[in-house]
Image (tube, rainbow, N blue to C red):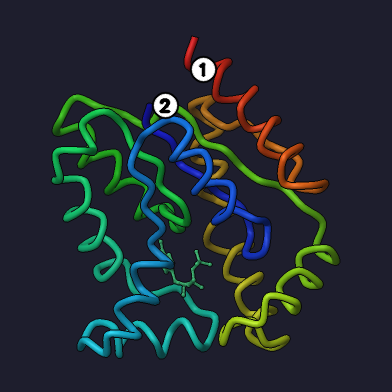
Amino acid sequence: MRIVFMGPPGAGKGTQATRLGRDLAIPHLSTGEVLRDACQAGTKSGREAAAYIDAGKLVPDETVLDIVVNRLDQDDCETGFLFDGFPRTVSQAEVLDRLLGEKNLAVELVLELSIGTDELISRLLQRGRSDDTEEVIRERLQQYDALTKPVISYYHQRDLVETICGEGNPDEIFARIKVAVDKVGK
Ligand code: AMP
């Protein structure tokens, strides 16, 4: 199955997407994770990305799309994939559609993990990543509202979105996700 996993920073996307990728035995790609690895490795693109990540801004589409194109070209993506944190802009979503269209494929399900802002901020402050300071969190939430929410509307037009309540314990949330996936998979 070809799944896009969306949700604001702190919604628990990473944890749930990793678990779902394993459960469905499909590759899981977190663009945020690949970008953070590149930052740590200190490559040129990693150093460029770090400035955006640390400011809570989105990394330019070109850098992110390079990562996605390379990953989609690998054989294991033939059975499906789970994208986590991508696409984050409508233009990224359009490129993804085009790339898949060239292979006669399409996104089949968009999972939106939804959670209240107060809960998000308290989870992010507890997590303590370098981009989890109060000021950067505010910027990331703004970027989400301005640039990523329109992606959810884009997929709503095609009736692909299942919104999952992201509050509660991780097992409960995963059970809700499985119900949504099974509905589409059957
Ligand atoms: P995440 O781990 O998904 O929260 O991503 C961490 C950071 O990586 C984001 O705040 C962005 O700066 C960057 N990032 C991850 N995915 C994307 C994307 N699809 N487009 C642009 N920037 C991204």
**Residue 154 point in image, percent of width and height:** 49, 40
Q: Residue at x 15, y 30 (%)?
A: 103
Q: Quadrant of residue 144?
A: bottom right
**Residue 175 point in image, percent of width and height:** 69, 30
- 17 or 137, which lies in front? 17
Task: Provide the residue designation for mark 2.
Answer: 108
| Figure quadrant of the N terminus | top left
Q: Residue at x 40, y 47 (%)?
A: 83
Task: Provide the residue designation for mark 1.
Answer: 184
Q: Quadrant of residue 80?
A: top left
Above or below residue 64? Residue 177 is above
Circle 1 SS class: helix
Circle 2 SS class: loop
Above or below residue 47? Residue 61 is above
Mark number, residue 52: none
* Number of residues whose C-alpha sits closer than 10 Å to that of mark 1, classed few (under 14), some (14–19) or many (20 or more): few
**Residue 120 point in image, percent of width and height:** 76, 65
The amino acid beneath tag 1 is: Val
Q: Residue at x 67, y 87 (%)?
A: 133
Q: State whether label 1 is within 8 Å of ligand 1.
A: no
The amino acid beneath tag 2 is: Glu
Q: Residue furthest top?
A: 186
Q: Are marks 2 and 1 in contact (CB under 8 Å)?
A: yes
Compare marks 2 and 1 and give the one earlier in the sequence: 2
Q: CA distance from mark 2 to mark 1?
A: 8 Å
- In the displayed structure, does residue 77 sit left or right of residue 120? left
- In the displayed structure, does residue 154 sit left or right of residue 119? left
Q: Quadrant of residue 75?
A: top left
